Image: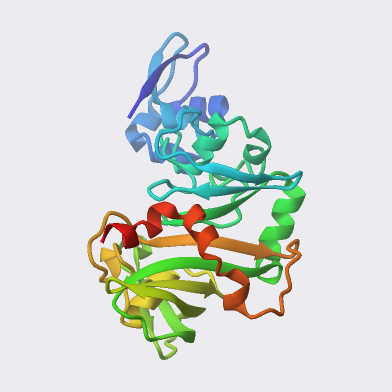
């Protein structure tokens, strides 16, 4: 953890009072960085304190970005559409984090997207993708669009399409509903059941097999819900864990082979009545959008 030295210019009855006055931060946040004894220590003018950089810059996004570089695919007055590579986080949790999509936006000078929802580290992101998942992400550039999409996301988002690679010849095509409960430390994993259990949430998806070769299947998934780890846990429950997803029983691989290929919301102009598979499967476009993921078919 990095620290900065700060010299106090006036007396204060406690370090807690001095920090809250200077940084306008909550007592709960201070307890993450200092012991109760430290916070009760009185401050005299001229004293020097070592303050954690993450505390001093709380809710700011580090301008340095480290990792595989995202791509800006589209920019309008209201939103940005980006491609997030795998092994890039969606957003930071502290100022020290530098491997997130938002760090890239700061470095790229996309200030409008960083000015939305400023009291939260996810800023204008309208949804999240796991660290190991690549693909499309949507970022609001103004508060009105952010609030409208956040409050009416299920109504406005028509399709959420993912490409997945699993081992074996996939034979579970169709529409599926399973019931999810979080388990593990901080809900790190989902338990999935075909029968409703008290306190569980329903997860719905539609899955089609695109191709099969070298004992691997490429799948197209239409995600009708949006639960944490939903595709990963649900395909595992169907007997086909994602290649590279060791958490849910998948074989070890270079990466987790899950890609958010296409999100379609109410601004889209395509025929919503056309058959799903025909509308969205375009192999050439798939290869361009997620060549790093689909290259597994070429190498093996």
In the displayed structure image, the side of residue 38 where residue 63 appears, left or right: right
Task: Name the residue at 33% across, 71% down.
Answer: 166
Residue occupying the far bottom of the picture: 195
Q: Nearer the viewer, residue 189 or 245?
A: 245
Residue 204 seen in the figure:
no
Task: Name the residue at 38% across, 40% down.
Answer: 32
Q: Position of residue 125 (x, y in %)?
A: 59, 50
Q: Nearer the viewer, residue 285 or 226?
A: 285
In the displayed structure image, the side of residue 108 where residue 287 appears, left or right: left
Residue 253 seen in the figure:
yes
In the rendered image, which quarter contains the C terminus?
bottom left
Task: Name the residue at 40% across, 19% down.
Answer: 4
Q: Nearer the viewer, residue 218 or 65?
A: 218
Task: Name the residue at 27% across, 69% down.
Answer: 250
Q: Is residue 171 above or below residue 24?
A: below
Quarter assignment of residue 126: bottom right
Q: Position of residue 219 (x, y in %)?
A: 43, 73
Quarter assignment of residue 212: bottom left
In the displayed structure image, the side of residue 217 where residue 44 appears, left or right: right
Q: Is residue 44 above or below residue 62?
A: above
Label count reads 0
Q: Position of residue 1 (x, y in %)?
A: 32, 30
């Amino acid at each position: 953890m990095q620290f900065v030295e700060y010299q106090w210019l006036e007396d204060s009855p406690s370090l807690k009072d001095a920090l809250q006055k200077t940084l306008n931060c909550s007592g709960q946040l201070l307890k993450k960085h200092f012991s109760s004894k430290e916070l009760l220590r009185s401050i005299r003018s001229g004293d020097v304190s070592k303050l954690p950089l993450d505390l001093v810059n709380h809710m700011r996004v580090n301008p340095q970005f480290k990792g595989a570089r995202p791509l800006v695919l589209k920019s309008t007055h209201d939103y940005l559409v980006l491609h997030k590579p795998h092994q890039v986080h969606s957003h930071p949790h502290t100022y020290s984090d530098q491997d997130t999509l938002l760090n890239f936006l700061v470095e790229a000078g996309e200030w409008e997207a960083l000015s939305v929802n400023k009291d939260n580290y996810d800023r204008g992101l309208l949804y999240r993708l796991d660290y190991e998942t690549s693909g499309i992400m949507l970022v609001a550039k103004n508060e009105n669009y952010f609030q409208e999409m956040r409050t009416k996301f299920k109504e406005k988002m028509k399709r959420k399409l993912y490409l997945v690679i699993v081992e074996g010849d996939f034979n579970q095509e169709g529409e599926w509903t399973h019931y999810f409960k979080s388990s593990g430390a901080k809900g790190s994993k989902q338990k999935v059941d075909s029968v409703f259990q008290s306190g569980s949430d329903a997860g719905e998806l539609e899955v089609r097999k695109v191709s099969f070769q070298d004992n691997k299947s490429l799948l197209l998934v239409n995600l009708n819900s949006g639960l944490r780890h939903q595709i990963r846990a649900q395909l595992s429950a169907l007997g086909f864990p994602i290649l590279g997803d060791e958490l849910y029983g998948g074989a070890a691989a270079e990466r987790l082979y899950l890609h958010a290929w296409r999100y379609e919301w109410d601004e889209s102009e395509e025929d919503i009545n056309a058959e799903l598979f025909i509308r969205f499967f375009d192999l050439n476009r798939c290869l361009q959008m997620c060549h790093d993921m689909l290259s597994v078919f070429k190498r093996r």
